[in-house]
């Protein structure tokens, strides 16, 4: 059963051009998300995030999974641009490998 609240949250979030592409790969129309970071991901990037473990990146499908209200709120408060800006402010280079990016102190702080 499709949750109409979740559908609306993701429709509104992906109206923002920054959220209309995968945070990690830039692929268009991401249908996965890292709840931990409030970012949108492609299916390929979601596999990498899953391999990091749920303590680093809790991943859910925006189209197939059921979402808890608190997780939807995390996505509403997050977004690709907000996470990108935070990493930049913390001095994490854009070109750092994905596995390293999410292991940084900055990423850990953001998750908390």
Image: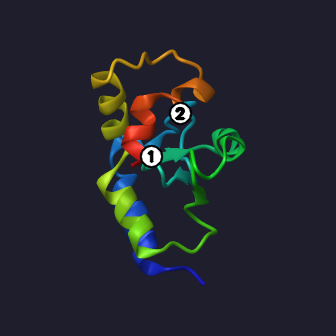
User: Which residue is most to the bottom?
Assistant: 1
Identify the element where label 1 is drawn: loop
What is the spatial separation of the Cα atoms under label 1 and label 2, in whole angstroms? 9 Å
Color scheme of the displayed model: rainbow
Q: Nearer the viewer, residue 21 or 95?
A: 95
| Residue pointed to by mark 2 | 102
Residue 27 disc label: none
Sooner in the amino-acid sequence: mark 1 or mark 2: 1
Against 102, residue 38 (above or below) is below
Where is residue 61 shown, x and y percent of the image?
Answer: 60, 60
Q: Quadrant of the N terminus?
A: bottom right
Against 96, residue 77 (above or below) is below
Q: Residue at x 57, y 47 (%)?
A: 57
Q: Residue at x 39, y 49 (%)?
A: 112
| Residue pointed to by mark 1 | 37
Whether residue 80 is visible: no
Q: Quadrant of residue 83?
A: top left
* Apparent side of residue 10 relative to residue 60 in the rendered image (left or right): left
Identify the element where label 2 is drawn: loop
- Rate crowding at label 2 as few (under 14), some (14 to 19) or many (20 or more) other CA atoms within 10 Å: some
Whether residue 61 is visible: yes
User: How many tags in the picture?
Assistant: 2
Q: Quadrant of residue 92?
A: top left
Q: Nearer the viewer, residue 101 or 8?
A: 101
Do residues under tags 1 and 2 come within 8 Å of each other at their CB atoms? yes
- Rate crowding at label 1 as few (under 14), some (14 to 19) or many (20 or more) other CA atoms within 10 Å: many
Where is residue 96 shown, x and y percent of the image?
Answer: 53, 17
* Apparent side of residue 66 relative to residue 36 in the rendered image (left or right): right
Q: Residue at x 35, y 65 (%)?
A: 73
Where is residue 41 shown, x and y percent of the image?
Answer: 56, 44
Q: Residue at x 36, y 55 (%)?
A: 13
* Apparent side of residue 84 relative to residue 3 in the rendered image (left or right): left
């Amino acid at each position: 059963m499709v949750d109409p609240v979740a559908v609306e949250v993701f429709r509104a979030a992906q109206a923002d051009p920054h959220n209309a592409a995968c945070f990690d790969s830039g692929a268009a129309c991401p249908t996965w998300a890292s709840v931990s970071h409030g970012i949108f991901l492609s299916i390929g990037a979601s596999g990498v995030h899953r391999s990091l473990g749920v303590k680093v990146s809790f991943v859910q499908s925006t189209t197939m999974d059921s979402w808890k209200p608190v997780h939807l709120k995390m996505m509403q408060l997050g977004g690709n641009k907000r996470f990108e800006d935070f990493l930049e402010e913390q001095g994490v280079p854009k070109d750092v490998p994905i596995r390293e990016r999410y292991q940084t102190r900055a990423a850990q702080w953001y998750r908390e």
